[in-house]
Amino acid sequence: MTKAKTAETIENVEFPSFDASKATDQIRAFAEKGVEQSKEAYSKLKTGAEETQKVLESTFETAKTVSSDLSLKTIAALRANAEAGFLHLEALIGAKSLSEVVELQTAFLRKRVETTVEQAKDFQAVVSKAAEDVSKPVKTAFEKALKDIKAA
């Protein structure tokens, strides 16, 4: 009796037919969609790479300019310090007494400390501005990339 039920059950079951033309159309549509998505991804990647290149070029140009400014500032400070040292040496040579030498030396050291503090403030301002100028294009590009990612 179980064999008879099994035979009846098998006769009542319908197997789906396979239509090759529909499968081909689906595969073609899937492949075309994949190609389109690949083209879009490549386009975005290419655009991102071009933007990154522009940002890096801008950053390097800014770094070059800032480095030049900092070098000129350093040379000016070194020149001022050397001139002050030579002037002080001339003044010491012209001193007529030990008390005058002590007075000249004290004034020189006080002036050197004040000048050093001023130069340090100038360097700090230049370096802070340099860091801001150099990092600004990168920061802007990073913020744009984050905005684009959030939008997508």
Image (tube, rainbow, N blue to C red):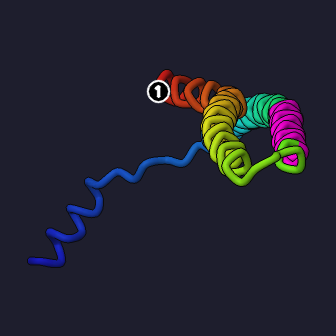
Up-down relation of residue 18 to residue 54 (above or below): below
Question: Does residue 71 appear in this view?
Answer: no
Q: Residue furthest left?
A: 1
Q: In this view, does 19 lie to the left or right of 8?
A: right
Q: Residue at x 49, y 21 (%)?
A: 151
Q: Residue at x 85, y 42 (%)?
A: 91
For the residue pair 32 and 51, the one nearer the viewer reads as: 51
Residue 36 position within the rendered picture, expressed as x and y whole percent measured from the top left: 72, 31
Residue drawn at 18 percent across, 78 percent down: 3
Q: Residue 15's spot in the image, x, y percent?
A: 40, 53
Q: Is residue 151 visible?
A: yes
Residue found farthest to the front: 97
Q: Nearer the viewer, residue 112 or 42?
A: 112
Q: Is mark 1 on a helix, strand or loop?
A: helix
**Quarter residue 12 falls in:** bottom left
Residue at 28% x, 63% y: name it: 10
User: 56 left or right of 20?
Assistant: right
Q: Quadrant of residue 5?
A: bottom left
Q: Does the magenta stretch include residue 76?
A: yes
Residue stretch in magenta: 64-90
Rate crowding at label 1 as few (under 14), some (14 to 19) or many (20 or more) other CA atoms within 10 Å: few
Residue 104 is inside the magenta segment: no
Disc 1 residue type (three-letter): Lys
Label the magenta part by its dominant secondary structure.
helix
Q: Please tell me how many numbered marks the rendered image carries.
A: 1
Which residue is disc 1 drawn over?
150
